[in-house]
Every structure is written in C-alpha cells, then in structure tokens.
Amino acid sequence: MATYTPTLDERLLDRLRGAVRGTVVEPGDPVYDEARKVYNAMHDRRPAIIVRAVDTGDVMATVDFAREQGVPLAVRGGSHSVPGYGTCDGGVVLDLGLMRGIRVDPDTRTAWVEGGCTWADVNHATHAFGLATTGGIVSTTGVGGLTTGGGLGHLARRCGLACDNLVSVDLVTADGSFVTCTDDQHDDLMWAVRGGGGNFGVVTSFAYRLHPIADILGGPTFFPLDADVIRRYRELVAEADERLGAVFLVGLGPPVPFLPERWHGRPVCGMVTCWTGPQEEDDRIRERVAALGPVLGRHLERMPYPVINTLFDDLVPAGLYHYWKGSFTQSLPDGIVDTLVEYGATTPSIQSVTVVFPIDGACHRVGPQETAFSYRDADYAIALSPTLTTREDCEAQKDWVRAFHRGLEPHSLEGGYVNFMDADDQDRVRANYRTNYDRLRDLKRRYDPGNVFRLNHNIAP
C-alpha cells in the first residue's frame, strides 16, 4: 500500500533550503534511503524531507517549516526510539546526528553536549578528565531521548538519573524560539525536560554535572536462571553501597568466550557489575556477586568506565527488530521474581534481554515533584525487549511480551518508564507521569498548543 505524502508548499520549502546550512534530503536523492533508516528496523517510513541540521539555526528553521506546513515533525538524535518516533511518513525528520560537539570544563565538572551526541561521544570526552555522568548501557544511544525521558544507567544509584544531572539545556520551542533553561531561568521548562520527553521542544545542547569516576570494576557474571539467584540479587541491592551499579539480566546465554558453550542459547540470568569504589575492595565485590548462585561464567575486571557502556553494542546493532514494554516496581516481590523466571525460560532470541535497573540510592533523594520523572518511590525499572532478526519473528513475539507484561502488572506500580514504552502504550501516558501529568499538560498548552511535538509519548495539550 502506497504511503500518502502531502504536497509541500514549494515557497516554504525553498525558504527552508535557503535557511539551513545543513542538508535537506528529499525522496529521489541518492542518500534518501540511507538517511531515512532508524535503529529499529520495524519502522520503514518515508518522510517528505529529512533535514540534517548542523546548528541551532537549522533546528529553528526546521521547526518553523513543519509548524507552518502543518506536517508531522520527527526529531531524531541517536535514532534509538523503539516506537519509531525518530521518523515518520509524509512529514519532516529533523536529524541532529551532525550536531555532536562537546566541551568539558574539569574545574566545574560540567560537560556541554550537543543534541546529536551519543553516550559513546560523552563518555569518551569526559573520561579524558577522569569524569563521568549517568548515561545508558548501550553506547550508541542518543543523549537526548534518554535524558529527557529520565535516564537510567549503571551510575544511577550513585549519581542519580541522567536528568538529575542536568544543569541547563538550550531548547527550541514550538514557535521556533530559542531559550536557555536552568533552575533560575525558564525553570518551568527545565522542570519539564527532566523526564517529560520530547513534548516541549528540541534540546540542542545539554549541560551535565560530572562526577569523579574513571576506572571501575565492571562486567557481567552469569548464573542459571533460578528464582533464588534473583532473590539474593534483591538482597544484595538492598544492602549494597550506592557505588555498586547492579543491572540484572534475564535471557539466553550469549556466545561469549567466558561462558561455556553448553550454556549458549540456554536460559540464564546475570548481573552487570559497575563498582566505582576503591580498587582495594574489588575482591570483596567479586565474592559478593559470586554468592548470588552457581557462577557459569564471568568477565569482571578493572576497565575504563566508557568500556562498560559498550558491552551490549555488538548484541544489539542497528537494523534489528524490536518491540518493548516496561514496568516500575517497589522492591522485587516474589510475584515479579516468579514471572521473570517463567518468561525468561521462553526468551525468543539471544538479543531479547529482559533488563532490571535499580533506581534507588541517589535517585530516591530527589522528590517526585522536583522533576517530571515522578517515580521516585520505585526501586527498579524493568525493560521487556524482544529483539529479533526479522519483522515476522518480531510480530510473532508481541503476544509473548504482552503476556510477560501482564504477569508483572499485579506486582508493579501503575506506570512505567517512558523510554521503555512502545507506540501502543499511549494510553499509559497519564499513569507514567502520575501527579505530574496535569502540570505537564498545562505547560504543553502554554508552549506547544498546536502539538507540534507530538511524535513522542504525547502529552496532548
């Protein structure tokens, strides 16, 4: 079935071409098919134009064009949006991928990061100064989507969410205006972008607070998939020093050299350690992790912090097919544990990893109304992510992940982490923001009454 493409106003399009320093890519251009690709291959869409912006002026001109033309506007940073919000049919894609400048001030421990950067860019730039901030677990993830959704990662227990480390943002709003937001100026928008997603504008630059973190003890330890292992993990997190990052995995054994071949493709669970404390305590941490259960294999070594964010990159390259669901939970009640074991045993592919993120510690020292991210009483965020190599296989596994999610629901909080929501989760938006939803909607009505920024987990004005 052919995709409907609206007729663009040639006068407006000519004005856009003249206004941008970057490239305006159109259907028929040699690079069009490559330029329209996104990370999740489930989304094979055909935008009317793709603007490859190189500066804030390009962003402002593109937002003006989309608003005046009345077509959908998709904002793309790292392009990892699983629901496909970084692309669209018949509209405008604003691609920030060329805006990747970074400046680090080691004296103030601050990094200014352009909106097209990935976490690999940030980690590389900050590590040179022995500094880091919370940012994802896959290095190719864009900073924009992860941060504005909240921002989980290995350092969250010690440093807070990515959005908790925001000092300021430069933002282009729906009317094409440019504003700098801090806790002292445009503080309402600053509050909203700390978890409110892409509903309020295009962030062209983020300023992050950095922390003195250089080398860590990091890497995965794998165990047989067993409820007792998860219960011991629950106990470990409850008592552990906040300097211990402890992301937990449920899935099939990956084909890595430190895991015996007989466990490749079989149900396993594991913990990814990120210990940012002193090296003299490494052996104690190794012993404590090993006490979770029978160790099948591990790669738990001293490494530069940026390395830990690359460990999953080869497992989930661009071009695979994804469908996600997410939940928040207080503690890990036995009902959650049993559901993880039940559905983990039928994980559909090696790339399909269920990830449990601890969000206690520093995350709990921010109040539920201090940022748009309201689930400060949650202890864990769970990501269900069947990932397959064909569209047909991914479609076939949607029922599996929906049943998995239903199994978690009686033991979970009402909402979930917006960055784990797929496109069919729009009915959960209010629950995802809880008591902050009405304030977010009021801000949406003020700053984007026409809902220009609607390709997201949308807060309708």
Image: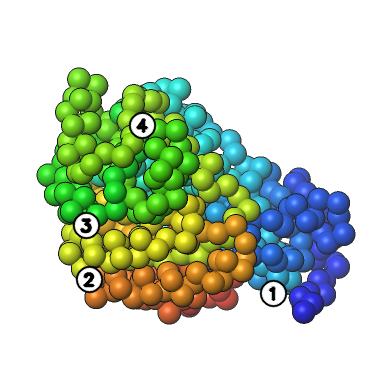
Instruction: Out of 124 and 113, give the one closest to the viewer.
Output: 124
Residue 135 at x, y percent in the picture? 41, 43
Q: Residues within 10 Å of mark 3 (few under 14, many from 20)?
A: some
| Element marked by disc 2 | helix
Task: Between label 2 and label 3, give the one nearer the viewer.
Answer: 3
Q: Amino acid at mark 1?
A: Gly
Q: Nearer the viewer, mark 4 or mark 1?
A: 4
Where does the image place residue 254, in percent across and percent down from the top left?
45, 44
Task: Confirm whether residue 245 shows in the render.
Answer: no
Q: Which residue is mark 4?
A: 299
Gap between marks 2 and 3 measured at Cα: 16 Å
21 to 337, vertically: above or below: above
Q: Which comes sooner in the sequence, label 4 or label 1?
A: 1
Using residue 207 as the reference point, say whether residue 40 is left or right of it: right
Which of the numbered marks, if any, corresponds to residue 222?
none
Crowding at dot 1, Cα within 10 Å, few <14 / some 14-19 / many 20+, comes out as some
Say which of 22 and 414 sits in front: 414
Instruction: Give the CA separation, mark 2 to mark 1.
Output: 43 Å
Q: CA distance from mark 3 to mark 4?
A: 23 Å
Q: N-terminal of the two: label 2 or label 1?
A: 1
Disc 3 marks a residue whose amino acid type is Ala
Picture mark count:
4
Q: Say which residue appears at 23% left-offset and 61% top-offset.
A: 337
Residue 283 visible in the shown view: yes
The residue carrying mark 1 is 70
Q: Residue sitting at 29 percent across and 45 percent down?
A: 223
Three-letter amino acid code of the residue under disc 2: His
Mark toward the start of the polypeptide (2 vs 4): 4
Look at mark 3 in the image and give the residue it sits on.
Answer: 227
User: Residue at label 2?
Assistant: 411
